[in-house]
Protein backbone atom coordinates (compact mmCIF):
# COMPACT_ATOMS: atom_id res chain seq x y z
CA UNK A 1 0.00 0.00 0.00
CA UNK A 2 1.31 3.43 -0.95
CA UNK A 3 0.54 6.62 0.96
CA UNK A 4 0.14 9.70 -1.21
CA UNK A 5 -0.06 13.29 -0.04
CA UNK A 6 -2.70 15.53 -1.53
CA UNK A 7 -2.02 19.12 -2.54
CA UNK A 8 -3.98 20.24 0.53
CA UNK A 9 -1.61 18.40 2.81
CA UNK A 10 -3.87 15.47 3.71
CA UNK A 11 -3.07 11.84 3.06
CA UNK A 12 -4.81 9.13 1.10
CA UNK A 13 -3.86 5.52 0.56
CA UNK A 14 -3.46 3.84 -2.78
CA UNK A 15 -3.32 0.08 -2.96
CA UNK A 16 -1.73 -1.92 -5.71
CA UNK A 17 -4.82 -3.31 -7.40
CA UNK A 18 -5.18 -5.83 -10.19
CA UNK A 19 -8.56 -5.61 -11.92
CA UNK A 20 -9.27 -8.78 -13.90
CA UNK A 21 -11.54 -9.08 -16.92
CA UNK A 22 -12.68 -5.52 -17.59
CA UNK A 23 -14.17 -4.50 -20.94
CA UNK A 24 -12.01 -1.53 -21.93
CA UNK A 25 -14.34 1.21 -23.20
CA UNK A 26 -16.95 -1.52 -23.45
CA UNK A 27 -15.06 -3.62 -26.02
CA UNK A 28 -11.85 -5.67 -25.62
CA UNK A 29 -11.38 -7.57 -22.37
CA UNK A 30 -8.18 -6.98 -20.42
CA UNK A 31 -6.67 -6.82 -16.94
CA UNK A 32 -5.53 -3.51 -15.44
CA UNK A 33 -2.78 -3.17 -12.86
CA UNK A 34 -3.01 0.04 -10.81
CA UNK A 35 0.06 1.07 -8.81
CA UNK A 36 1.30 4.38 -7.40
CA UNK A 37 -1.64 6.30 -8.82
CA UNK A 38 -1.05 5.12 -12.39
CA UNK A 39 -2.22 2.39 -14.72
CA UNK A 40 1.00 0.41 -14.51
CA UNK A 41 0.11 -2.29 -17.00
CA UNK A 42 -2.81 -3.40 -19.14
CA UNK A 43 -3.18 -6.73 -20.93
CA UNK A 44 -4.34 -10.32 -20.70
CA UNK A 45 -3.43 -12.67 -17.86
CA UNK A 46 -1.57 -10.12 -15.71
CA UNK A 47 -0.20 -10.95 -12.28
CA UNK A 48 1.66 -8.98 -9.63
CA UNK A 49 2.97 -10.15 -6.27
CA UNK A 50 1.22 -8.44 -3.41
CA UNK A 51 -1.54 -6.87 -5.50
CA UNK A 52 -5.12 -7.04 -4.32
CA UNK A 53 -7.03 -8.86 -7.06
CA UNK A 54 -10.48 -7.56 -7.98
CA UNK A 55 -12.77 -9.53 -10.26
CA UNK A 56 -14.48 -7.07 -12.62
CA UNK A 57 -15.43 -9.68 -15.20
CA UNK A 58 -17.68 -8.07 -17.81
CA UNK A 59 -17.71 -4.60 -16.24
CA UNK A 60 -17.22 -1.65 -18.57
CA UNK A 61 -13.98 0.21 -17.78
CA UNK A 62 -14.04 3.92 -18.65
CA UNK A 63 -11.76 6.83 -17.89
CA UNK A 64 -13.08 8.67 -14.84
CA UNK A 65 -16.01 10.87 -15.78
CA UNK A 66 -15.54 14.64 -15.95
CA UNK A 67 -18.45 17.03 -15.39
CA UNK A 68 -18.03 20.48 -16.89
CA UNK A 69 -21.14 21.83 -15.15
CA UNK A 70 -21.67 21.17 -11.42
CA UNK A 71 -23.17 23.38 -8.73
CA UNK A 72 -21.45 22.64 -5.41
CA UNK A 73 -23.06 25.65 -3.64
CA UNK A 74 -20.11 26.30 -1.30
CA UNK A 75 -19.40 28.98 -0.16
CA UNK A 76 -22.71 30.43 0.89
CA UNK A 77 -25.38 27.82 0.24
CA UNK A 78 -24.19 24.88 2.30
CA UNK A 79 -27.77 23.91 3.19
CA UNK A 80 -28.06 22.65 -0.40
CA UNK A 81 -24.61 21.14 -0.92
CA UNK A 82 -20.99 21.47 0.11
CA UNK A 83 -17.84 20.74 -1.81
CA UNK A 84 -17.40 17.61 0.30
CA UNK A 85 -20.96 16.29 -0.14
CA UNK A 86 -21.01 17.17 -3.83
CA UNK A 87 -17.66 15.45 -4.31
CA UNK A 88 -19.05 12.31 -2.69
CA UNK A 89 -22.08 12.41 -4.99
CA UNK A 90 -19.76 12.78 -7.96
CA UNK A 91 -17.60 9.81 -6.99
CA UNK A 92 -20.72 7.68 -6.51
CA UNK A 93 -21.69 8.51 -10.09
CA UNK A 94 -18.28 7.51 -11.50
CA UNK A 95 -16.81 11.03 -11.70
CA UNK A 96 -13.22 11.85 -10.90
CA UNK A 97 -13.36 15.57 -11.75
CA UNK A 98 -16.03 18.26 -11.63
CA UNK A 99 -16.04 21.91 -12.64
CA UNK A 100 -17.72 24.02 -9.95
CA UNK A 101 -19.99 26.81 -11.19
CA UNK A 102 -19.44 30.26 -9.66
CA UNK A 103 -22.95 31.16 -8.45
CA UNK A 104 -21.96 30.96 -4.80
CA UNK A 105 -21.96 33.59 -2.04
CA UNK A 106 -19.62 35.32 -2.42
CA UNK A 107 -19.62 34.76 -6.16
CA UNK A 108 -16.46 33.08 -7.46
CA UNK A 109 -15.28 36.21 -9.25
CA UNK A 110 -11.88 36.69 -7.58
CA UNK A 111 -8.69 34.68 -7.21
CA UNK A 112 -9.31 34.33 -3.48
CA UNK A 113 -12.66 32.59 -3.83
CA UNK A 114 -11.58 30.15 -6.56
CA UNK A 115 -8.46 29.24 -4.56
CA UNK A 116 -10.64 28.57 -1.51
CA UNK A 117 -12.84 26.24 -3.58
CA UNK A 118 -9.78 24.46 -4.93
CA UNK A 119 -8.43 23.90 -1.43
CA UNK A 120 -11.75 22.53 -0.16
CA UNK A 121 -11.86 20.10 -3.06
CA UNK A 122 -8.32 18.93 -2.36
CA UNK A 123 -9.16 18.42 1.30
CA UNK A 124 -12.22 16.34 0.42
CA UNK A 125 -10.18 14.12 -1.90
CA UNK A 126 -12.99 12.29 -3.66
CA UNK A 127 -12.63 14.09 -7.00
CA UNK A 128 -10.66 16.91 -8.56
CA UNK A 129 -12.69 20.09 -8.04
CA UNK A 130 -11.85 22.67 -10.71
CA UNK A 131 -13.42 26.09 -10.09
CA UNK A 132 -15.15 28.03 -12.85
CA UNK A 133 -14.82 31.79 -12.58
CA UNK A 134 -17.62 34.29 -13.09
CA UNK A 135 -17.53 36.36 -16.28
CA UNK A 136 -18.82 39.52 -14.61
CA UNK A 137 -18.49 40.95 -11.11
CA UNK A 138 -21.16 39.41 -8.92
CA UNK A 139 -22.64 37.81 -12.06
CA UNK A 140 -24.48 41.11 -12.56
CA UNK A 141 -23.52 41.50 -16.21
CA UNK A 142 -22.16 45.01 -15.78
CA UNK A 143 -18.35 44.74 -15.86
CA UNK A 144 -15.82 41.98 -16.31
CA UNK A 145 -14.60 40.08 -13.27
CA UNK A 146 -10.91 39.47 -12.50
CA UNK A 147 -10.50 36.96 -15.33
CA UNK A 148 -6.74 37.29 -15.59
CA UNK A 149 -6.19 37.05 -11.83
CA UNK A 150 -8.29 33.89 -11.64
CA UNK A 151 -6.41 32.43 -14.59
CA UNK A 152 -3.06 33.18 -12.93
CA UNK A 153 -4.17 31.92 -9.50
CA UNK A 154 -3.32 28.51 -8.06
CA UNK A 155 -6.72 27.37 -9.38
CA UNK A 156 -5.61 28.12 -12.96
CA UNK A 157 -9.17 28.88 -14.07
CA UNK A 158 -9.77 28.38 -17.78
CA UNK A 159 -13.58 28.25 -17.89
CA UNK A 160 -15.66 31.34 -17.12
CA UNK A 161 -19.44 31.51 -16.86
CA UNK A 162 -22.24 33.53 -15.33
CA UNK A 163 -24.36 30.37 -15.36
CA UNK A 164 -27.74 30.98 -13.87
CA UNK A 165 -27.62 34.27 -15.73
CA UNK A 166 -26.99 35.06 -19.37
CA UNK A 167 -24.19 37.42 -20.35
CA UNK A 168 -26.84 39.41 -22.16
CA UNK A 169 -24.92 42.57 -23.10
CA UNK A 170 -23.22 41.86 -26.44
CA UNK A 171 -20.39 44.29 -25.71
CA UNK A 172 -19.57 42.60 -22.40
CA UNK A 173 -19.72 39.21 -24.13
CA UNK A 174 -17.39 40.38 -26.89
CA UNK A 175 -14.89 41.77 -24.39
CA UNK A 176 -14.94 38.56 -22.37
CA UNK A 177 -14.31 36.45 -25.47
CA UNK A 178 -11.41 38.72 -26.43
CA UNK A 179 -9.91 38.73 -22.94
CA UNK A 180 -9.74 34.96 -22.43
CA UNK A 181 -7.87 34.42 -25.70
CA UNK A 182 -4.67 35.51 -23.92
CA UNK A 183 -4.62 32.35 -21.77
CA UNK A 184 -6.66 29.91 -23.90
CA UNK A 185 -9.76 30.35 -21.81
CA UNK A 186 -13.36 29.69 -22.79
CA UNK A 187 -16.61 31.51 -22.06
CA UNK A 188 -19.42 29.12 -21.14
CA UNK A 189 -22.69 30.88 -21.91
CA UNK A 190 -26.04 30.33 -20.23
CA UNK A 191 -28.10 31.06 -23.35
CA UNK A 192 -31.30 32.72 -22.19
CA UNK A 193 -32.61 36.05 -23.35
CA UNK A 194 -34.01 37.48 -20.08
CA UNK A 195 -36.60 39.66 -21.78
CA UNK A 196 -38.10 36.71 -23.64
CA UNK A 197 -38.37 34.61 -20.47
CA UNK A 198 -39.80 37.07 -17.96
CA UNK A 199 -42.24 35.14 -15.76
CA UNK A 200 -41.73 31.93 -17.74
CA UNK A 201 -42.61 28.74 -15.89
CA UNK A 202 -42.07 25.95 -18.43
CA UNK A 203 -41.42 25.28 -22.10
CA UNK A 204 -43.65 27.28 -24.41
CA UNK A 205 -45.84 24.90 -26.37
CA UNK A 206 -49.02 22.86 -26.32
CA UNK A 207 -48.58 21.71 -22.72
CA UNK A 208 -47.98 25.21 -21.36
CA UNK A 209 -51.07 26.42 -23.22
CA UNK A 210 -53.19 23.63 -21.72
CA UNK A 211 -51.89 24.25 -18.20
CA UNK A 212 -52.07 28.02 -18.45
CA UNK A 213 -48.43 28.45 -17.44
CA UNK A 214 -46.28 31.22 -18.91
CA UNK A 215 -44.19 29.76 -21.70
CA UNK A 216 -40.40 29.73 -22.09
CA UNK A 217 -39.84 29.97 -25.86
CA UNK A 218 -37.10 28.07 -27.64
CA UNK A 219 -36.06 31.26 -29.41
CA UNK A 220 -34.92 32.73 -26.08
CA UNK A 221 -32.11 30.16 -26.13
CA UNK A 222 -31.52 30.03 -29.85
CA UNK A 223 -31.20 33.79 -30.39
CA UNK A 224 -28.40 34.09 -27.81
CA UNK A 225 -26.53 31.11 -29.26
CA UNK A 226 -26.79 32.58 -32.76
CA UNK A 227 -25.44 35.93 -31.57
CA UNK A 228 -22.61 34.39 -29.58
CA UNK A 229 -21.30 32.07 -32.28
CA UNK A 230 -21.02 35.11 -34.55
CA UNK A 231 -19.19 37.04 -31.82
CA UNK A 232 -16.84 34.11 -31.24
CA UNK A 233 -16.14 33.90 -34.95
CA UNK A 234 -15.54 37.65 -35.13
CA UNK A 235 -12.95 37.72 -32.33
CA UNK A 236 -11.51 34.22 -32.96
CA UNK A 237 -12.17 32.94 -29.47
CA UNK A 238 -13.54 29.81 -27.80
CA UNK A 239 -17.24 29.65 -26.90
CA UNK A 240 -18.99 26.88 -24.99
CA UNK A 241 -22.79 26.64 -24.86
CA UNK A 242 -24.21 25.36 -21.58
CA UNK A 243 -27.20 22.98 -21.34
CA UNK A 244 -28.39 23.19 -24.95
CA UNK A 245 -32.01 22.01 -25.08
CA UNK A 246 -33.81 22.71 -28.38
CA UNK A 247 -33.81 21.36 -31.91
CA UNK A 248 -33.14 24.86 -33.22
CA UNK A 249 -30.08 25.19 -30.99
CA UNK A 250 -28.68 21.97 -32.44
CA UNK A 251 -29.15 23.37 -35.93
CA UNK A 252 -27.31 26.59 -35.04
CA UNK A 253 -24.34 24.74 -33.51
CA UNK A 254 -24.19 22.43 -36.51
CA UNK A 255 -24.16 25.44 -38.85
CA UNK A 256 -21.50 27.21 -36.77
CA UNK A 257 -19.18 24.19 -36.75
CA UNK A 258 -19.47 23.80 -40.51
CA UNK A 259 -18.52 27.47 -40.72
CA UNK A 260 -15.40 26.82 -38.64
CA UNK A 261 -16.45 28.62 -35.48
CA UNK A 262 -14.57 27.41 -32.37
CA UNK A 263 -17.71 26.46 -30.45
CA UNK A 264 -18.54 23.49 -28.24
CA UNK A 265 -21.84 22.56 -26.63
CA UNK A 266 -23.20 20.40 -23.85
CA UNK A 267 -26.51 18.66 -23.18
CA UNK A 268 -27.75 17.48 -19.80
CA UNK A 269 -28.92 13.94 -19.10
CA UNK A 270 -32.42 15.19 -18.29
CA UNK A 271 -32.76 16.93 -21.65
CA UNK A 272 -31.85 13.60 -23.29
CA UNK A 273 -34.67 11.74 -21.57
CA UNK A 274 -37.43 13.85 -20.01
CA UNK A 275 -40.09 15.99 -21.70
CA UNK A 276 -42.46 18.81 -20.74
CA UNK A 277 -45.29 16.28 -20.43
CA UNK A 278 -43.96 15.61 -16.91
CA UNK A 279 -45.00 19.10 -15.82
CA UNK A 280 -48.70 18.13 -15.96
CA UNK A 281 -48.59 16.90 -12.34
CA UNK A 282 -46.91 20.13 -11.14
CA UNK A 283 -44.16 18.07 -9.49
CA UNK A 284 -41.43 20.67 -8.91
CA UNK A 285 -38.70 18.05 -9.27
CA UNK A 286 -39.23 18.61 -13.00
CA UNK A 287 -38.78 22.39 -12.86
CA UNK A 288 -35.43 23.28 -14.35
CA UNK A 289 -33.63 25.97 -16.35
CA UNK A 290 -33.69 25.57 -19.31
CA UNK A 291 -37.05 23.82 -19.04
CA UNK A 292 -37.85 20.32 -20.14
CA UNK A 293 -38.73 20.54 -23.82
CA UNK A 294 -40.90 18.69 -26.35
CA UNK A 295 -40.32 15.12 -27.48
CA UNK A 296 -39.13 16.54 -30.81
CA UNK A 297 -36.39 18.47 -29.01
CA UNK A 298 -35.32 15.41 -27.03
CA UNK A 299 -34.92 13.42 -30.24
CA UNK A 300 -33.02 16.28 -31.88
CA UNK A 301 -30.51 16.67 -29.05
CA UNK A 302 -29.96 12.91 -29.00
CA UNK A 303 -29.20 13.03 -32.71
CA UNK A 304 -26.91 16.03 -32.19
CA UNK A 305 -24.99 14.22 -29.48
CA UNK A 306 -24.71 11.07 -31.59
CA UNK A 307 -23.38 12.88 -34.68
CA UNK A 308 -20.90 15.05 -32.76
CA UNK A 309 -22.70 18.38 -33.10
CA UNK A 310 -23.09 18.39 -29.31
CA UNK A 311 -19.70 17.65 -27.78
CA UNK A 312 -20.40 16.51 -24.25
CA UNK A 313 -22.88 15.53 -21.57
CA UNK A 314 -22.78 17.73 -18.46
CA UNK A 315 -25.04 17.21 -15.46
CA UNK A 316 -25.95 20.76 -14.39
CA UNK A 317 -26.18 19.14 -10.93
CA UNK A 318 -28.25 21.73 -9.04
CA UNK A 319 -29.07 20.74 -5.45
CA UNK A 320 -31.76 22.52 -3.42
CA UNK A 321 -33.08 22.00 0.12
CA UNK A 322 -36.44 20.23 0.38
CA UNK A 323 -38.41 23.39 1.09
CA UNK A 324 -37.29 24.93 -2.21
CA UNK A 325 -39.12 22.19 -4.10
CA UNK A 326 -41.96 21.26 -1.72
CA UNK A 327 -44.07 24.27 -2.67
CA UNK A 328 -46.27 25.65 -5.44
CA UNK A 329 -44.85 25.26 -8.94
CA UNK A 330 -44.43 28.98 -9.57
CA UNK A 331 -42.49 29.46 -6.32
CA UNK A 332 -40.25 26.41 -6.65
CA UNK A 333 -36.56 26.72 -7.46
CA UNK A 334 -35.19 25.57 -10.81
CA UNK A 335 -32.79 22.65 -10.81
CA UNK A 336 -32.17 18.93 -10.41
CA UNK A 337 -29.41 16.83 -8.88
CA UNK A 338 -27.79 14.58 -11.43
CA UNK A 339 -24.30 13.36 -10.59
CA UNK A 340 -25.31 9.93 -9.30
CA UNK A 341 -27.69 9.22 -12.17
CA UNK A 342 -25.97 10.72 -15.23
CA UNK A 343 -24.15 7.65 -16.52
CA UNK A 344 -27.24 5.51 -16.07
CA UNK A 345 -29.42 8.00 -17.96
CA UNK A 346 -26.90 8.22 -20.81
CA UNK A 347 -26.91 4.43 -21.02
CA UNK A 348 -30.71 4.38 -21.24
CA UNK A 349 -31.10 7.26 -23.68
CA UNK A 350 -28.06 6.77 -25.90
CA UNK A 351 -26.29 3.42 -25.50
CA UNK A 352 -29.23 1.07 -25.09
CA UNK A 353 -30.96 2.79 -28.02
CA UNK A 354 -27.95 2.08 -30.24
CA UNK A 355 -27.16 5.73 -30.88
CA UNK A 356 -23.64 5.60 -29.40
CA UNK A 357 -21.11 3.07 -28.08
CA UNK A 358 -19.31 2.91 -24.75
CA UNK A 359 -16.28 4.31 -26.54
CA UNK A 360 -18.41 7.32 -27.38
CA UNK A 361 -19.40 7.58 -23.72
CA UNK A 362 -15.71 7.83 -22.81
CA UNK A 363 -15.42 10.70 -25.27
CA UNK A 364 -18.52 12.71 -24.31
CA UNK A 365 -18.34 12.19 -20.55
CA UNK A 366 -14.58 12.19 -19.96
CA UNK A 367 -12.17 13.04 -22.73
CA UNK A 368 -13.95 16.02 -24.31
CA UNK A 369 -15.05 17.72 -21.06
CA UNK A 370 -11.47 17.54 -19.81
CA UNK A 371 -10.18 18.93 -23.11
CA UNK A 372 -12.66 21.81 -23.20
CA UNK A 373 -11.82 22.72 -19.60
CA UNK A 374 -8.08 22.26 -20.18
CA UNK A 375 -7.92 19.89 -17.20
CA UNK A 376 -4.71 17.89 -17.41
CA UNK A 377 -4.50 14.30 -16.15
CA UNK A 378 -8.19 13.66 -16.69
CA UNK A 379 -9.95 12.18 -19.68
CA UNK A 380 -6.81 10.25 -20.57
CA UNK A 381 -7.09 6.91 -22.40
CA UNK A 382 -6.92 3.66 -20.48
CA UNK A 383 -3.33 2.82 -21.33
CA UNK A 384 -0.20 2.07 -19.34
CA UNK A 385 1.44 5.12 -17.81
CA UNK A 386 -1.74 7.19 -17.60
CA UNK A 387 -3.26 8.40 -14.32
CA UNK A 388 -5.49 5.78 -12.72
CA UNK A 389 -8.68 7.86 -12.69
CA UNK A 390 -11.24 5.38 -13.90
CA UNK A 391 -14.64 3.82 -13.31
CA UNK A 392 -15.84 0.24 -13.57
CA UNK A 393 -19.50 0.12 -14.50
CA UNK A 394 -21.99 -2.75 -14.55
CA UNK A 395 -24.32 -2.07 -17.47
CA UNK A 396 -26.53 -5.11 -16.91
CA UNK A 397 -28.75 -4.49 -13.88
CA UNK A 398 -31.91 -2.41 -14.09
CA UNK A 399 -33.72 -1.26 -10.99
CA UNK A 400 -35.71 1.61 -9.59
CA UNK A 401 -33.73 4.71 -8.72
CA UNK A 402 -34.39 5.77 -5.12
CA UNK A 403 -33.31 8.43 -2.66
CA UNK A 404 -30.86 5.87 -1.27
CA UNK A 405 -28.88 6.22 -4.50
CA UNK A 406 -28.16 9.87 -3.70
CA UNK A 407 -24.97 10.75 -1.82
CA UNK A 408 -25.19 14.54 -1.74
CA UNK A 409 -27.03 16.80 0.67
CA UNK A 410 -30.18 17.31 -1.46
CA UNK A 411 -32.70 14.88 -2.91
CA UNK A 412 -34.29 16.87 -5.76
CA UNK A 413 -33.78 14.15 -8.36
CA UNK A 414 -36.29 13.71 -11.19
CA UNK A 415 -35.45 10.00 -11.37
CA UNK A 416 -36.65 8.84 -7.95
CA UNK A 417 -39.16 6.08 -8.62
CA UNK A 418 -37.98 5.62 -12.21
CA UNK A 419 -36.31 2.51 -13.58
CA UNK A 420 -32.73 3.07 -14.73
CA UNK A 421 -30.09 0.62 -15.93
CA UNK A 422 -26.57 0.18 -14.66
CA UNK A 423 -24.51 0.61 -11.51
CA UNK A 424 -21.12 2.13 -10.72
CA UNK A 425 -19.07 -0.62 -9.06
CA UNK A 426 -15.64 0.97 -8.63
CA UNK A 427 -14.31 4.52 -8.92
CA UNK A 428 -10.64 5.43 -8.58
CA UNK A 429 -9.35 9.00 -8.39
CA UNK A 430 -5.64 9.05 -9.27
CA UNK A 431 -5.36 5.51 -7.94
CA UNK A 432 -7.28 6.24 -4.74
CA UNK A 433 -10.42 4.13 -4.35
CA UNK A 434 -13.56 6.20 -3.69
CA UNK A 435 -16.19 3.58 -4.58
CA UNK A 436 -15.46 -0.07 -3.81
CA UNK A 437 -17.74 -2.86 -5.00
CA UNK A 438 -20.64 -0.45 -5.30
CA UNK A 439 -20.13 1.19 -1.91
CA UNK A 440 -19.09 4.82 -1.52
CA UNK A 441 -16.24 4.97 0.98
CA UNK A 442 -16.38 7.18 4.06
CA UNK A 443 -12.85 8.37 3.27
CA UNK A 444 -11.06 8.05 -0.08
CA UNK A 445 -8.78 5.03 -0.11
CA UNK A 446 -9.91 3.65 3.24
CA UNK A 447 -12.03 0.52 3.05
CA UNK A 448 -13.50 -1.19 6.09
Image (cartoon, rainbow, N blue to C red):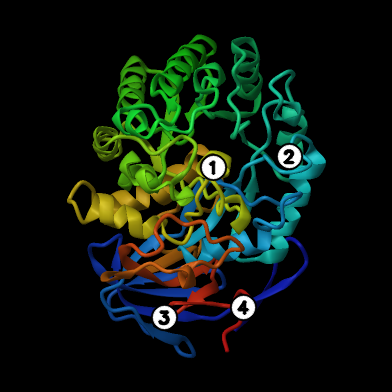
Quadrant in the picture for residue 87? bottom right
Residue 108 in which image quadrant = top right
Secondary structure, mark 4, is loop
Mark 4 or mark 1, which is nearer the start of the sequence? 1
**Residue in the foreground of this view, choosing between 295 and 170:** 295
Q: Earlier in the sequence, mark 2 or mark 1?
A: 2
Q: Provide residue 170's location: percent of width, then percent of height.
A: 59, 11
Drawn side of residue 134 relative to residue 244, left or right: right
Q: Secondary structure at mark 1?
A: loop
Q: Which residue is mark 2?
A: 108
Does the image show residue 82? yes
Asked which quadrant contains residue 326, the reply is bottom right
Residue 129 image position (x, y, % from top left): 63, 53
Give the residue pinned by disc 3. Answer: 18
Checking the image for residue 442, the label placed there is 4
> Is label 2 or label 1 in front?
1
Please name the residue that numbered disc 1 is placed on.
334
Q: Earlier in the sequence, mark 4 or mark 2?
A: 2
Mark with earlier residue (3, 1): 3
Amino acid sequence: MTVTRSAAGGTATTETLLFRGARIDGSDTADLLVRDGLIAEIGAGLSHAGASVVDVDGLVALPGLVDLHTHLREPGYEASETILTGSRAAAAGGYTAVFAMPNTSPVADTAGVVEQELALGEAAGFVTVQPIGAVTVGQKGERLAELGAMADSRARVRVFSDDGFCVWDPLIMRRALEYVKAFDGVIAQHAQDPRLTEGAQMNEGAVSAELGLAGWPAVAEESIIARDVLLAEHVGSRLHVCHLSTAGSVDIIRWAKKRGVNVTAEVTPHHLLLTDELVRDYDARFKVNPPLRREEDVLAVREGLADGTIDIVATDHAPHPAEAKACEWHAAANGMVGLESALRVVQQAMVDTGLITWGDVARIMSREPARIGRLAEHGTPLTAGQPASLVFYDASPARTFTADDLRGRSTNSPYIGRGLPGEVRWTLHHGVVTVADGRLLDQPGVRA
